[in-house]
Structures are given as C-alpha cells and as structure tokens.
Amino acid sequence: MKYKLLFLFLALLFCSTLQANNTYLTALQKKASKEALWQKKSWLNLLHYRQSSGILSPQFESSIDQPSFFLSPTGHQDPEGELQATLAALFSNATNNDQHAQCRFIARFNWLTEQLNIQKNQLPAINCKSYTGWKARVNAEKITLVFPAYYLNSPSSMFGHTLLRLDPKEGEGWSDWLSFAVNFGANVNEADNSIMYAYKGLMGGYPGQFAVVPYYEKILEYSRIERRDIWEYELSLTPIEVNRLVEHLWELNGVNFDYFFFTENCSFRLLELLEIARPGINLTDEFSLTAIPIDTIRAVERTGLIKKAHYRPSREAVLQTLIGDLNTSERTVLRKLLNNPKESTLFGLANERQQLVVKTAYKLLRFRQNKLARDKAVAQKSYQLLALMNRYPVKKQKPVPPPVQPEKSHLSKQAVFKVGERDNKSYTEFGFKMAFHSLDDNEFGFLRGAQINIGSVRFRRSEKGTVSLQQLDIVDIFSLSPRTDFFQPLSWRIKGGAERVYRHKNDRLVKHISGGVGSSWNISPNTSAYSLLTARFEAGSHFKSYIEPALGAMGGLLIHNKIGTGKIELASQKFLGGIQASDLNFEQSILLSKNQSIKLNLKREWLNNTSLSEFGASYQLHF
Amino acid sequence: MKKVIGSVIGGAVLMAASSSAMAVAAGGPNCGWGNLLFKGAKGIPSHVVAVTTNGTTGNNTFGITSGTNGCNANGRLTYGGRDMVQVSSILDEFSEDVARGHGDAMNTIAVLIGVKQSDRSAFSEVMHENFALIFPNEQVTAEQAMLSVNAIMKSDSRLVKYAV
C-alpha cells in the first residue's frame, strides 16, 4: 500500500515534468502511436504481457503486477499506455541517477531508441552507476543453459530444474565456478515448513523472483548436497543477444512474478528471457499447460540454439565410478582405511592403486558427512586422508563417463491403447498420462529405477459397450535406489488416486493412498530386485466404515534388456476388516522406437478364497 | 631442497599471520572467514529452501555484491583489496584440490587472486607442494589458509607478483 502511494506520487512527478513541453518527445510519442509500436512482440515480451482474446479486442495482462515495474498507473494491463509513459519517463528531469527510467529500464530504453531512432543528445544525460557496475561484474558474453537432473527425493526437483549461466568471453582464463547463475524461483517465506513450501509453490502462493548468484553455489547445492548430475548446454546466442538478455535481467531485479510449479515456473521464465535475447523465436507458446524442464530444453534445441552439452557429474556419480574401479581386495582396504586412515593400512597395494583407494576413501567419508554438522573425529580422519592423498604425484582423474543426454529420452506425455481380457470378459482401454516416466518405459536418458507419473487416467470399454473410469493416478512415484556395500539408500513408493479393483465379487472403483518403504539390490548389471513393506488407505462403500487401512508387503524383479523392460511383482495386503488381497503381475515392454512401445501383461489376483486372471496388450506412444 | 624452502616459507607464514596486515576480515561475525575446514553442508546457506521450491531467500541475491553469505555488504571480505568472500564457501573443495594438485576449486581461487592463465600450472604445483603449510591441521580457518597461500606465493619467483 505504501508503495502504491509512493508510486502515484512518482507518477504525478512524471506527469508534471511532461508539462515542461518537450516537442521532441511529443513527436516521438506521435510516431510511436502511428506505427502502433506497442503491438510489436518485442515490446509485449519486455513487459511480460500475455494476450487473452477478448470479444472485441485482445486483452493484455502482464505476469508482473508490481506497480514499480510499470511507468503508467495502468501499465499492468495497458501496453500502449505503458509505452507512451515510458517515452515520457526517459525524458524526465526529475532525477539524474540510478532511479531514472533510463537506468531502471535499460532494455526498454534501448529498444525504443532503436525503434524510434531517438537522438541521444535530445535526452537528459543520466549516470547509471549501479547498472554499469553490475554489468561489468556480471561480464557476460555467452550463455549456458543449465539442467540439474532429476532427483526423486525432493518434491521440487523430481522433474529437474533449469537455470542460466552467464559466461565471459572464451579464452580469458576464467573459472566457470565464478560465472553468475540466473535462477528463477519462488521467493519463499523461511518460516514456512516444507509442506507449506510444496503447497504454496504449487498453488501460486509465493511470488517468483530472479536471483543472480555465483555458479559455484549452484554446484555445491546440486552436485554436493542433492547428488544431482548437472547438464550444461552452451547456447549459440551472439554477444548482442546476450547483452539484450542481461539488460532485461537488470529490469527484473527484485520484481515479483506469478509463480506456479507446473506452468509459470523456472523453466518457463527462462524461455521468456531467451525470446527477448533473440527476437523472432517462439519458445513459450507450447507450454501453456505444463512447462516440464526437460521439455523446455527440447524446445530450445529445436530452435538450434544449443551448441554443445557438457556433463558435470554429482559427487555420488563420481564416487560410484571410483568404487566401480576397485576390485574386492581393494574394497576391503578401502573399508579398513575409513576406520584407520594410516599409510600402513595400504601396505601391499601398488602405488597407483593406493592413490585410488585413498582418494575414494576421502570422497566417501566426505560424502557420508554431507548433510551433517561438523564432527571433530570425522574432520580429523578427513584431514589424515587428505594429507595421505597429498603424498602421491599429481594425477588427473579419469572423467566419469557421461550418461545419455536427458533431452534424448522419450517425450513426456503418453497415450495408451489397450485390448485385454479380464475374468474371461474382453475389454478395450484408452489412457492418457500428463507426465512422465514409468519403470517399464524406455529408460534411454533416464535415471534407472526412478518412476514418476503425474495425472494418469484410463477409461475402459466393456464387452457390453459401457465406458467407465478404470484408473486415475494423481501421483505415482516409485524410487528404487540399489543398496551396495557402501551405500544404503531407502527405496520407496507413493501412489494416490482412484482405481477399479476386485472387491466383494465385483470390480469396484475405490479411492486410495498407498505407500511403501524398503530396499532394492542389483542382482546383475541389468537386473534388480526390490522388496517393500506397504500400507494402504482405501475408501469405498464395500467397507463398513467407508475407509479401511491395510498393511502388506511387495517384492519384485526388474529386468532391463535390449527388447525392453520386464517386471515381475508379487504384492499382498491384509485389510483391517479381514480382506486379504494379493496379486502376481508380469509385464514386459517391447520397444518399437524411442517413443513407441508394446506392453504385454499377465496378472493373477486373489481375494480371500476367489481368484481371477487378466491379460492384455497395449500400444504406448509418448508425445 | 623443497623441505628447506618449505620451512622457510613456514616461518614467513607465521610472521604474516601474526601481523595479519593483509587479510581484512570485515563484514561481521557470520561472514565465513573464520569457517573451519570441513565445515561441510551446514556452512552453505539456503539449501533447505532451494530443495523444496528451487527458490531463494534473503537479499543480495542479484549479483550486486558477489555471494555475500550473510555478510554485511559494506565491509566486504577483502584480500589485498580483492573480493574474496567465496573462499570460505569452497574451502573443502580447495583443500582437496591442493592435496591432489589440480581441480576446479584451485582454478577458481587462482582466478580470484588474479593468477594469469600462463601461471596457473605453477600455482597448482606450488600449492600442491605446500599442502601441509596451507592446511597444517583440520582446525585451520579460511582466513589462515589464505594468509598461507599469500605467504607461499611471496616466496615463489613465479608467483610473487600475485602476493600482497
């Protein structure tokens, strides 16, 4: 409120300076009007206007509703008035420093100057000290699009994230750790707990803001703390285009945007910045429903902006590679060394192998300490290992072999057509999934063992011709992280929605939330086994109390091969009211192409003393 | 021979540290200059926030001052006039790079100090040889480590021009 008053006051100031009667300005304003400059895409982009088609004329509204971002009091919805007000403000004599419109809105200023051929000598001379200093510090000539990959154990990072990195000219011997990273994220209230974060983040409860921080902070955050690999895509923007982006970024300092987790999120906003950098490209239009980070990278790739990709492995990936290089006896030495970091422990190994074991031990110790407070004993051990590491000659380490680039994976949405038979009655089924990846989908470019499905729906048509809802998964996440000698992660599952299940002699639609926690192991490089303890809350009229809880267990095998992925799973659960429900399920996918597959399934279900079988075949298409 | 040089430098480091004329630890008590080695993730702010909404908190997140880590922006951490606030955040990474003789963190510190590309390999080599001086034990702070780096550069003919 205070700011609104202040703004009105400032607006008055601008209006009064207008009366100083600048004929040059009036001429410019007339020219802008005549050319309908405000309708140009570049202007609409700079102010972040979105167009909704009104009945008589198009309506505009900016994603930004902060009054200080506009020079016209109606600027939020009035691109034309805003352009005229901006022109006036550029000629204002009210101030001659950083607060002047020429400094605050440098990108708009430069765009208007170019469009209207504004004579610099007609403008008041303004010294934009803050901007000049900031720009020199940012020192950008290249832009890299950064994609910290998927990480299932945190709700906001399941789909990955994107940010930009501003790099200086090549050959300056710079360190990319010191480049600035441009990150769009919700500006959250630190007092809120994580459930509030998630809720408000999804529902638009937090304003979104751009932040510009040194890139090493992001490296530490993602590769060190969150164990996420980072992909860096160097873009082919010219220095002039980069400059345009940087100028606009300055205008966004401290500006609040609408923020929605699925649509107007980090990735969407970055696309807007790229559209401003290179006028004429259209990146945002296809993301009106969801802007999944990897899809936005694909969109950028389609415009030909991506020059090359660089892989920055997480600490975990580095460690896995190091450990994978050690043989059994070396692993034994590694374990001993962690307890007793002395040179004598290494006795018997060749120098080069010693060096490798010491390095691995150090990294493992630090990795385990990652999220913990400083511990004196661990610090001492860490230091001993470092000192030991220092005794060996300098040797560059082998780089971690990069996995398949994530944008090469299958697309995010999926359509399914299925024919099958259940209890000797045939059916056909149509399904749609908003996003993203199932364990038995084509794993090319995905993290193995990470399933995340959002908004999946299936309709089934029976023999008689009735169509009914078969399944609605609001969310279905399954995280299988294999346990090894050195890592003991949990595997878990959560699923919620509605599904038709066999209860009381009939298939009934029930609502449910199900989850489980357990472990998974790699039996061979391409086969993993898992077992989980599960719990389920099911709601339906077949229960006396409407909602009933159940406890159970499940176990399965996941087999990856050239044909596709096979899954065998046995699950059983007992409800509080006494119902015992079990099923044995076999699925095999057969890959036809990157985005197409056939899936076969066989299922046997038991409910107390009855049982039935189902089998089917589906055609699945990612698009 | 290296050992001899080492002990000479060691003396110089001690003297430098006691006069403490070079590094100005300004910016308030939470600034990180006093961070111990292996402070770990707890020393890095805002990750809790970041993991849930990709968001940020707080001010000064627009690169106006570079990564102030809760420091007061007026008295920036300086090292002979250079902005060295980053060192405390990447001290762990730096110590590992010094121990093994190469790495991104070491390159970053070299850039911050202003070491030219042609002198970077000399910088890495000299740092690697003097690991025990820069990091004499696990109780070393970012400030102490950087004072030692300076003293070591002072006694190396190729790096002396970067010392203050």
Image (cartoon, rainbow, N blue to C red):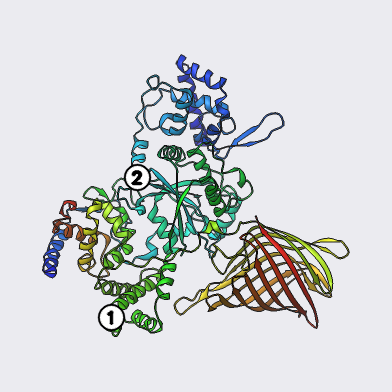
Q: Which residue is mark 1?
A: A342
Q: Is residue A543 visible?
A: no
Q: Quadrant of residue A323?
A: bottom left
Q: Is residue A331 left or right of residue A344?
A: right
Residue A263 screen position, x and y as percent:
60, 49
Residue at x-position 50% and y-position 56%: A191
Determine whether A204 is above or below A23 in the image.
below
Q: How many marks?
A: 2
Alpha-carbon span between mark 1 and mark 2: 45 Å
* SS type, badge 2: loop
Q: Is residue A535 visible?
A: yes
Q: Quadrant of the C terminus of chain A?
A: bottom right
Residue A385 got which mark?
none
Q: Is A173 or B9 nearer to us in this picture?
A: A173
Residue A70 screen position, x and y as percent:
51, 32
Residue B15 screen position, x and y as percent:
13, 61
Mark 1, other Cα within 10 Å: few <14 / some 14–19 / many ≥20: some
Residue A68 screen position, x and y as percent:
49, 35
Residue at x-position 29% and y-position 63%: B102
Q: Which residue is mark 2?
A: A169
Determine whether A605 is above or below A306 in the image.
below
